[in-house]
C-alpha cells in the first residue's frame, strides 16, 4: 500500500482537549495551509480563507466566547463559563476556515461550500502527515453572530470549521467505522432488470 493511502486509512482526529504543545512550527503551519489550498475549486474562486488563532489571541477570543455564552445563558455556573473561555486554548494553534461562497453565474454556491469542506479535510491530512494531532470542530460558536463578527467575518461568510492543531497527549483510540458493503453500491440500469 502506498504511503499516502496508508496515511489516509489510519488518520484519526484527536480530541482538542487531548492536545498539548508543541503546535506546528511556522513552516509546518504554512505547509498545512498550502495543502488546504490545493482543493478542487471550480472556477478558481478561492471561496474560503483562513483566520489563525494562536498565542494570547486564543485567550482573548476565548473571553469573547465566555461573554457571549454568559449573555445567552442566564444563571449559568461560572465553571461552565470558564470552560467556554478556554475553548481556543485547548490546542497551540486553531485555524478558522471561513467559507465565502458567493453568487456566481456558473458555479453553484453548494460547490463552493464543498470546496471549503475539502480545505478542512486536506488540512487534517497534512497535519497528520507532519506528525501533528488535529481536530475539525464547529460547535455553537461557529454559528454565533457576535463570534463571527469578532473573527472578522463579512455578511455572507460562514465558519466551515475550526481546525485545532497540536500534539496528542496520548494515541487516539480507533472509532467504529461503517461496514464497506453498507455504504457502497454499484448503480444498475433499472431498465435492464
Image (cartoon, rainbow, N blue to C red):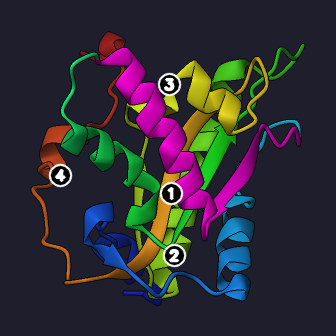
Cα distance in 3D space between marks 2 and 1: 10 Å
N-terminal of the pair, mark 2 or mark 4, is: 2
Q: Is residue 167 visible?
A: yes
Cα distance in 3D space between marks 3 and 2: 25 Å
Could you say whether the residue bearing mark 4 is in a helix, strand or loop? Answer: helix
The residue singled out by tag 4 in the image is: 180
Cα distance in 3D space between marks 2 and 4: 26 Å
Residue 168 position within the rendered picture, expressed as x and y whole percent measured from the top left = 31, 81
Give the left or right position of residue 138, taking residue 45 as reference.
left
Cα distance in 3D space between marks 1 and 4: 28 Å
Residue 163's disc is 1
Answer whether labels 2 and 1 touch (C-beta < 8 Å).
yes
Q: Is residue 15 visible?
A: no
Quarter of the view holding residue 171: bottom left
Whether residue 53 appears in magenta in the rendering, the answer is yes
Residue 26's disc is none
Question: Which residue occupies 46% across, 27% down?
Answer: 68
Residue 14 position within the rendered picture, expressed as x and y whole percent measured from the top left = 29, 68
Cα distance in 3D space between marks 3 and 4: 33 Å
Residue 127's disc is 2
Could you say whether the residue bearing mark 2 is in a helix, strand or loop? Answer: helix
Q: Which residues are magenta?
A: 44-73
Above or below, 163 relative to 73: below
What quarter of the picture does the N terminus occupy? bottom left
Answer whether labels 1 and 4 touch (C-beta < 8 Å).
no
Above or below, 16 relative to 154: below
What quarter of the picture does the C terminus occupy? top left
**Closer-to-camera residue (187/131):** 131
N-terminal of the pair, mark 3 or mark 1, is: 3
The residue singled out by tag 3 in the image is: 143
N-terminal of the pair, mark 2 or mark 1, is: 2
Amino acid at each position: 500500500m502506498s504511503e499516502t493511502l496508508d496515511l489516509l486509512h489510519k488518520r484519526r482526529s484527536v480530541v482538542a482537549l487531548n492536545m498539548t504543545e508543541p503546535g506546528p512550527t511556522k513552516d509546518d503551519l504554512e505547509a498545512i495551509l498550502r495543502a488546504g489550498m490545493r482543493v478542487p475549486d471550480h472556477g478558481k474562486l478561492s471561496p474560503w480563507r483562513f483566520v489563525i488563532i494562536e498565542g494570547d489571541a486564543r485567550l482573548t477570543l476565548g473571553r469573547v466566547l465566555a461573554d457571549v455564552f454568559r449573555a445567552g445563558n442566564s444563571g449559568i455556573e461560572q465553571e461552565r463559563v470558564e470552560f467556554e473561555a478556554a475553548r481556543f486554548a485547548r490546542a497551540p494553534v486553531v485555524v478558522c476556515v471561513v467559507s465565502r461562497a458567493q453568487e456566481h453565474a456558473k458555479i453553484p454556491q453548494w460547490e463552493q461550500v464543498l470546496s471549503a469542506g475539502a480545505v478542512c479535510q486536506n488540512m487534517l491530512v497534512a497535519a497528520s502527515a507532519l506528525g501533528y494531532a488535529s481536530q475539525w470542530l464547529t460547535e455553537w460558536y461557529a454559528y454565533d453572530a457576535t463570534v463571527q463578527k469578532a473573527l472578522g467575518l463579512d455578511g455572507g461568510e460562514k465558519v466551515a470549521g475550526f481546525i485545532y492543531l497540536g500534539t496528542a497527549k496520548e494515541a487516539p483510540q480507533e472509532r467504529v467505522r461503517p461496514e464497506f458493503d453498507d455504504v457502497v453500491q454499484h448503480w444498475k440500469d433499472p431498465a435492464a432488470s
